[in-house]
Amino acid sequence: MIGSYLVENKKILENAYDLLNDTYTKVRNISHAQKSSVLSSHGLIGTLEQLASRINAGKSIQVEVIHHGLHGNLSNSMELGLFRIIQELLNNTVKHAQAQHASIILTGYEDHISVMVEDDGKGFLPDTISNTSTGLESIKARVQHLDGTMEIDTKINRGTTINIEIPLL
């Protein structure tokens, strides 16, 4: 009797897990589709320029977008990944850096893309940032997902520069 009860409960839990997994996947796909449609209509650079324009309208910080050598040959998933990385970096800058200026510099090379996001803010000590800091951990995970590397150059009262290299496969 107890054995059949446990088997039945296990089946119910497995079904619930499968349902949750399916729901998560559908919500994630909808989110990707919405972001992808914005990117596909304006491209990565256009979308970043719109983001910078919205931030600049707040007048607390001025963001510029500089790009070289990007010729629209990026996949949708690469553009989406880069956009989300840069969006989170700018979000961190606006929230925490107390910066007046920030720059997003994208450079396309034959075999990789270089992304530099820098600001003139208060900087931080990387060792003091908790491993549970969702923003930076999310960025690191996204960079790793694209097989890239990330370096943080920051000092107190000197601002922050984050360099990301993403290979083109």
Image (cartoon, rainbow, N blue to C red):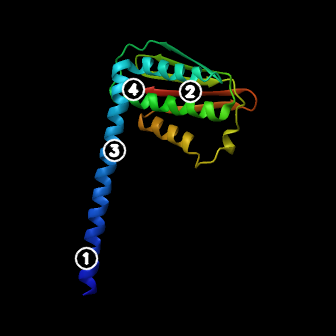
Sooner in the amino-acid sequence: mark 3 or mark 2: 3
Neighbourhood count class around disc 1 (C-alpha, 10 Å): few under 14, some 14–19, many 20 upward:
few
- Spot occupied by residue 4 in the image (x, y as percentages of width and height): 23, 81
- Indicate the secondary structure of the residue bearing disc 1: helix
Disc 1 versus disc 2: distance between alpha carbons?
52 Å
Task: Pick out the residue farthest to the right.
Answer: 157
The three-letter amino acid code for the residue at tag 4 is Glu
Sooner in the amino-acid sequence: mark 1 or mark 4: 1
Tell me which residue sits at (66%, 39%) in the image.
Answer: 126
Neighbourhood count class around disc 4 (C-alpha, 10 Å): few under 14, some 14–19, many 20 upward:
some
Q: Name the mark on residue 153.
A: none
The three-letter amino acid code for the residue at tag 3 is Val
Sooner in the amino-acid sequence: mark 1 or mark 2: 1
Left or right: residue 99 compared with residue 46: right
Q: Quadrant of residue 167?
A: top left
Q: Which residue is mark 4?
A: 79
Q: Nearer the viewer, mark 3 or mark 2?
A: 3
Sooner in the amino-acid sequence: mark 2 or mark 4: 4
Q: Which residue is mark 2?
A: 163
Q: Which residue is mark 1?
A: 7
Sooner in the amino-acid sequence: mark 3 or mark 4: 3
